[in-house]
Amino acid sequence: LVGVNVLVGGGVARFWNSSVVGSAREDTLDLLAFAGNRGYEIALNADELRARVEGLVAQGGDGGLGAGTDSAGSGATGSGAPSAGTTHPFVHTANGPRLLGLFAPSHLPYEIDVHGGLAGFRDGQTPPRDETDAPSLTEMLEAALRTLDIANWSATGATTEDHGFVLVVEAGRIDHAAHANDASAVLGEICAYDRAFVRAIQYASERDDTLVVATSDHDTGGLSVGCCDVYGMNVPELTKVTQSAEGVAGGIVGG
């Protein structure tokens, strides 16, 4: 964690020590305590993530992104620099503000399982989430941008110098669903990625110093099944599915 300002996603079981039920560790290290002792604000659900980011903003300035986002992930933007005469608690901190968000024991749940289907993604919309759920990819992106914008100008105490940052955002469960040939789950994850990409482009469009690169590292499975040079994809049928194969299997095993 040394030198990393923001780390959000799943995998909290790998931070619990072996005495915690469900821990993925075989030792007694408590990495949540380790992170807390090194200045990380820790969030374990969407509501806590919003609260931790608002706390960082209140301590160190707006970070240029205003008060937050609406349910579709859009946000108001400002100058990206603190106002004159503001005192910043991160000025003498080597790495600036730090945020650790861990929202599931292992992988984050599929969008289709969170929302009980894909209907909420129609017409470019983003379905709402319960505050105790894991945040959406767009919400995690927003939290990272707000935190890193504070870190930009607070790292050395220069109130007008922008140091920049590198942020990697992965919609990793597209790959998982594609490996499982679960086309409906793939579609839900692509929708989530699409909303996050739109937010990233919006952020970049309001600055003159930001590059957004979107790519996939390989192809696996997909949204169609091919045979005899015919590849078919029936989106209306895919959107009728209300649960991933993983979710169905989990319900059988756990039920």
Image: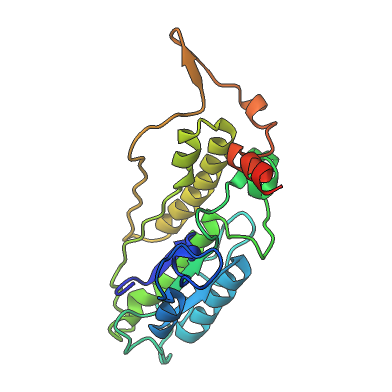
Residue 118 percent coordinates (x, y): 66, 40
Q: Quadrant of residue 51?
A: bottom right
Q: Is residue 236 left or right of residue 108?
A: right
x 30%, y 68%: residue: 164
User: What residue is at 41 percent from the left and 92 percent from the top?
Assistant: 85
Q: Is residue 134 left or right of residue 143?
A: right
Specify whether 123 is left or right of 87: right
Percent of width and height locating residue 253: 65, 45
Q: Is residue 157 above or below residue 77?
A: below
Q: Nearer the viewer, residue 134 or 163?
A: 134
Q: Quadrant of the N terminus?
A: bottom left
User: Can see residue 13?
Assistant: yes
Q: Residue at x 68, y 48 (%)?
A: 115
Residue 89, horizontal then vertical, whole percent:
41, 90
Q: Is residue 78 visible?
A: no
Give coordinates of residue 67: x percent, y percent. 57, 72
Q: Is residue 40 left or right of residue 246?
A: left
Q: Please determine whether, in this image, residue 81 is positioned above or below residue 142.
A: below
The answer to whether residue 58 is above or below residue 248 is below
**Quarter-wise, where is residue 152 in the image?**
bottom left
Q: How many marks?
A: 0
Residue drawn at (35%, 42%), measured in percent from left and top?
215
How are the colours assigned in the image?
Answer: rainbow
